[in-house]
Amino acid sequence: MTTKQKALIGTVMMAVVLSMAGCAGMSRQGQNTMVGAGVGAVGGAVLTGGSPLGTIGGAAVGGLVGHSMH
């Protein structure tokens, strides 16, 4: 993994942590969507070696899964 890919994964992880702090006033479904998108983004980045397309795709899939959770 290159330095650029490691930096991308670190940035995504930091964004997830910071966005979690803003979930206090959100509905449960909104919180699930945000968590799903964050986990999906990190997972997509890791599985594709830091590919931006993999990160975005992971976030989209994770957000959809999180949104559908009850």
Image (spheres, helix red, strand yellow):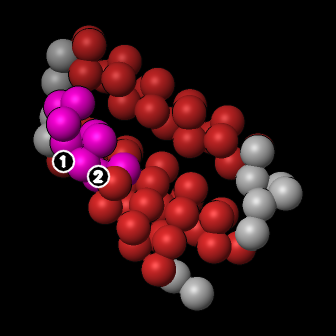
Q: Residue at x 18, y 47 (%)?
A: 47
Residue 65: x and y, percent? 40, 72
Q: Is residue 55 magenta?
A: yes
Residue 57: x and y, percent? 24, 49
Seen as rendered, the residue at the extreme right is 25
Seen as rendered, the residue at the extreme bottom is 70
Location of the N terminus by quadrant is top left
Residue 58 is tagged as: 2
Crowd class of label 2 (few under 14; some 14 to 19; many from 20; radius 10 Å): many
Magenta span: predominant SS is helix
Q: In the rendered image of this protein, does residue 42 appear above or below residue 69?
A: above
Is residue 67 or residue 36 the one in the foreground? 67
Is residue 42 or residue 69 the one in the foreground? 69
Side of 16 where 38 appears, left or right: left
Tell me where residue 17 sits by quadrant: top right
Secondary structure under tag 2 reads helix
Side of 19 where 46 appears, left or right: left
User: Is residue 46 in view from this perspective?
Assistant: no
Q: Is residue 52 magenta?
A: yes
Residue 47 is tagged as: 1
The boundaries of the magenta stretch are 50-59
Mark 2 near mark 1, Cβ–Cβ under 8 Å?
yes
Q: In the rendered image of this protein, does residue 50 appear above or below residue 21?
A: above
Tell me where residue 10 sits by quadrant: top left
- Residue depth check, mark 2 versus mark 1: number of the one nearer the observer: 2
Please state which amino acid type lies under the numbered disc 1.
Leu
Secondary structure under tag 1 reads helix
Is residue 6 or residue 54 the one in the foreground? 54
Seen as rendered, the residue at the extreme top is 3
